[in-house]
Amino acid sequence: MLGMKGSNIMSDRKIILPPKKKKIELKDSNIIPATELLLHDAKAIIGAELAHYRAKVIRGVTLAPQEARIVQGYLESLVKIQKEEREQSKDEDLSQLSNEDLLKLAANVLKK
């Protein structure tokens, strides 16, 4: 009899799922990624890693080929980050825009 009661209890239970959320698409999102912060964090991480390898070399330890490739990858990434920062600074420089372009930009900002 206990076995039957246990099976009745299990059949009476219902699993309640939370309501489905509406899928958010990128075009509907108002969140602007802070790429400057991400680039700054990436530079800090790369800087710390390069400092680690630099300390090894200063102590007289020769880097293994794998470590040298890692350092090369960090340096290539650092160059890419610096190029991206230069591009962003060019895009943010409003002094190069004409009065008409500035008015259009202001109108677009006010629309949002």
Image (cartoon, helix red, strand yellow):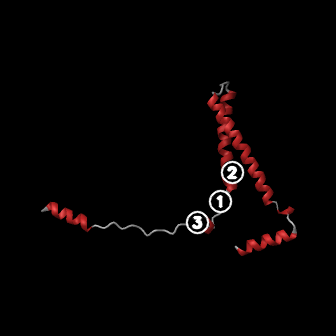
* Amino acid tagged 3: Glu
Is there CB contact under 8 Å for labels 2 and 1? Answer: no
Residue 28: quarter of image = bottom right
Residue 6: quarter of image = bottom left
Question: In this orientation, which residue lies closer to the viewer: 101 or 38?
Answer: 101
Give whichever of discs 1 and 3 has the lower sequence position. 3
* Amino acid tagged 2: Leu
**Above-or-below relation of 95 to 77:** below
In this view, the mark in front (1 or 3): 3
Is 22 positioned to the left or the right of 111 in the image? left
Is 90 positioned to the left or the right of 35 in the image? right
Residue at (71%, 39%) from the top-left corner? 75
Question: In this orientation, which residue lies closer to the viewer: 22 or 70?
Answer: 22
On residue 33, which mark appears?
1
Residue at (67%, 35%) from the top-left corner? 71
Spatial separation of the CA atoms under disc 2 and disc 1: 11 Å
Residue at (65%, 28%) from the top-left corner? 63
The residue tagged 3 is 25
Give whichever of discs 3 and 2 has the lower sequence position. 3
What SS does tag 1 mark? loop
**Residue 34 x %, y %:** 67, 58
Query: How would you rate the neighbour count of disc 3 (Cα within 10 Å): few for under 14, some for 14-19, many for 20 or more?
Result: few
Spatial separation of the CA atoms under disc 1 and disc 3: 14 Å
* Picture quarter with the N terminus: bottom left
In this view, the mark in front (3 or 2): 3
Query: How would you rate the neighbour count of disc 2 (Cα within 10 Å): few for under 14, some for 14-19, many for 20 or more?
Result: some
On residue 111, which mark appears?
none
Give whichever of discs 2 and 1 has the lower sequence position. 1
What SS does tag 2 mark? helix
The residue tagged 2 is 39
**Residue 15 x %, y %:** 33, 66
**Above-or-below relation of 77 to 57:** below
